[in-house]
Amino acid sequence: MCGRYSFTTPVEAVRRLFGVSGGGNLAPRYNVAPTQAAAVVRLDEKTPPGRLLDHLTWGLVPSWAKDASMAARMINARAETVAEKPAFRNAFRRRRCLVPADGFYEWRAEGGAKQPYYIGFADRRPFAFAGLWEHWMGKDGSEILSFTIVTTEANDLLRPLHPRMPVLLEPEDHARWLDPAADAPGDLLRPYRGQGLGFHAVSRHVNNVRNDDATCIAPLPPAAAPLALPPAQGRLI
């Protein structure tokens, strides 16, 4: 699964990479957590469509939901079932989005506790998770725009940490993923095959959602780092 991530890239670099307008002055986020608002890239529903950098709630609320309480259970959509699950299938066909990030976290059971790891690229370049978004309206007229992150089986690098990982999209696949007129691109929902991805152990400071600072992504010093995990190719510095 993917339960926390970071997005600290300056907004101008984000606009260039994703070809978007809007977004304002994005504050660095080191510990984005479920039910919080976070930046996503989606198509403007105007004609002709353009790309928007928007802020949606993490935790998808289906349009048919009676209330918004299920959002916390809908932070991830499994690639294997996303085309069939009632909560996700319409969004998968028509409302796909990109979720900008520059790292994410997984927790590994070690010695009776869970050790957090930070995963990303050694050069800290931003990337996009495959996401879905939805529009929900309550009976009282309240509205929620929300999103979920699609996950798949972990690749060889990350399997020692967790059996699953978020789907990371290559830049050349962004347009196809966003295009609602394109056939549902299920072939993109695969473990990451590229180079340069790595990880390092971080402190449990990240466990508290109120902590949203650079300490969350800082590597543990060698003396404090876990010894049970073999060195990973492309480990972050």
Image: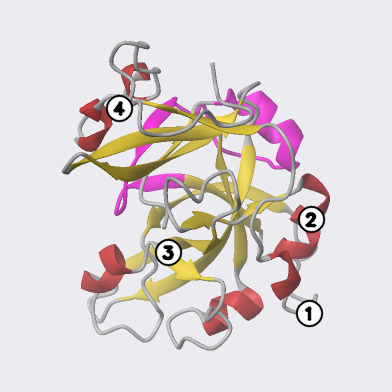
Mark 2 = which residue? 173
Callout 4 secondary element: loop
* Mark toward the viewer: 1 or 3: 3
* Marks 4 and 1 close (CB-CB < 8 Å): no
Q: Is residue 147 left or right of residue 122?
A: left
- The amino acid beneath tag 1 is Asp
Callout 3 secondary element: strand
Magenta range: 9-38
Q: Is residue 176 left or right of residue 54?
A: right
Q: Which of the two discs, 1 and 2, labels the residue nearer the N terminus? A: 2
Callout 1 secondary element: loop
* Marks 2 and 4 close (CB-CB < 8 Å): no
Q: Which of the two discs, 4 and 3, labels the residue nearer the N terminus? A: 3
Mark 3 = which residue? 76
Q: CA distance from mark 2 to mark 4?
A: 30 Å
Mark 1 = which residue? 183
Q: Which of the two discs, 2 and 4, labels the residue nearer the N terminus? A: 2
* Mark toward the viewer: 4 or 3: 3
- The amino acid beneath tag 3 is Asn
- The amino acid beneath tag 2 is Asp
Q: Which of the two discs, 3 and 2, labels the residue nearer the N terminus? A: 3
